[in-house]
Every structure is written in C-alpha cells, then in structure tokens.
Image (cartoon, helix red, strand yellow):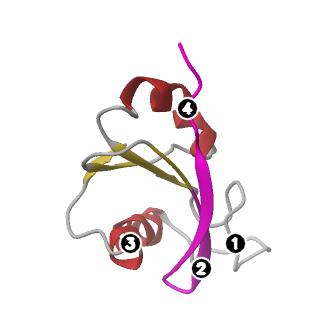
Amino acid sequence: MSMVDTGHSFVPARSVRRHVAEAGSGPPLVLVHGWPEFWATWEPIFARLADCFRLIAPDFRGFGESENPHPQPTNTVNTARLAEDIVALPDATKIDRCSFVC
C-alpha cells in the first residue's frame, strides 16, 4: 500500500482551533475518531480511500493537536458538545455537503 500525501491545518470552529488532517479528492468524507484516539486512527484508511474521496479527519477539542479550552477536568465537554463541534466543521471549511464515518 502506497503512502498518501496528508495535509494538516487548523480550522477555527465553535471557538476552538481544531487540527484537521486531509487527503485525497472527490466527495468530502469526514472521519470521526473514537475515544481516546485522534486523527491518526484513520491514517490506514487514507491510503485506501484517497483516490475516491476528500478525506477530512479532525481531532476532537482537547485531542491530538486541537486546542483544549478546558485544560482542567470539566463537565462542560460531553458527547453532545463533541457532536456539535464535528457538525460545525463543514460550515467552517465551506463544505456544503458531506458524509460522516464514525
């Protein structure tokens, strides 16, 4: 399996500077990592799907290289907030339509 050129950027969305890894071209496909992982969970998939999709793998707030606005333990970050963050990402990157893989 060949290596895929992966780009990295930071996208401000919902007041958090989010790290995003991207590869490929085609219809956008947002790859949502699990807990307590980060974007690199999807790196093996990049090599398989980059020819067919624009792969977008963001890190949750406080994960990987994404900003952590709550460095101390807090109950303000929950699954609902993380889901809202992920749904806000396409708007922040000017993507009108995309699919999600969790």
The kind of secondary structure the magenta stretch mainly shows is strand
Residue kind at label 4, given as amino acid type:
Val
- Label number found at residue 16: 2
Q: Which residue is mark 1?
A: 67
State yes or no: residue 40 in magenta.
no
- Label number found at residue 46: none
Q: Which residues are magenta?
A: 1-20
Q: Are marks 2 and 1 in contact (CB under 8 Å)?
A: yes
Report the residue at 48% width, 26% height from top.
47
Report the residue at 59% width, 79% height from top.
16
- Label number found at residue 4: 4
Q: Earlier in the sequence, mark 3 or mark 2?
A: 2
Q: Are marks 3 and 1 in contact (CB under 8 Å)?
A: no
Kindly report which numbered mark, 4 or 2, lies closer to the viewer in this rendering. Answer: 4
Residue kind at label 1, given as amino acid type:
Glu
Which element type, helix, strand or loop, lies under badge 1?
loop
- Inter-mark Cα distance, 3 to 1: 16 Å
> Is 52 situated above or below 61?
above
Residue at the far right: name it.
Answer: 72
Q: Earlier in the sequence, mark 2 or mark 1?
A: 2
Report the residue at 41% width, 23% height from top.
48
Kindly report which numbered mark, 4 or 3, lies closer to the viewer in this rendering. Answer: 4
Taking the image as shown, residue 49 lies to the left or right of residue 65, namely left
Q: Visible in this render: residue 31?
A: no
Q: Are marks 1 and 4 in contact (CB under 8 Å)?
A: no
Which element type, helix, strand or loop, lies under badge 2?
strand
- Inter-mark Cα distance, 4 to 2: 27 Å
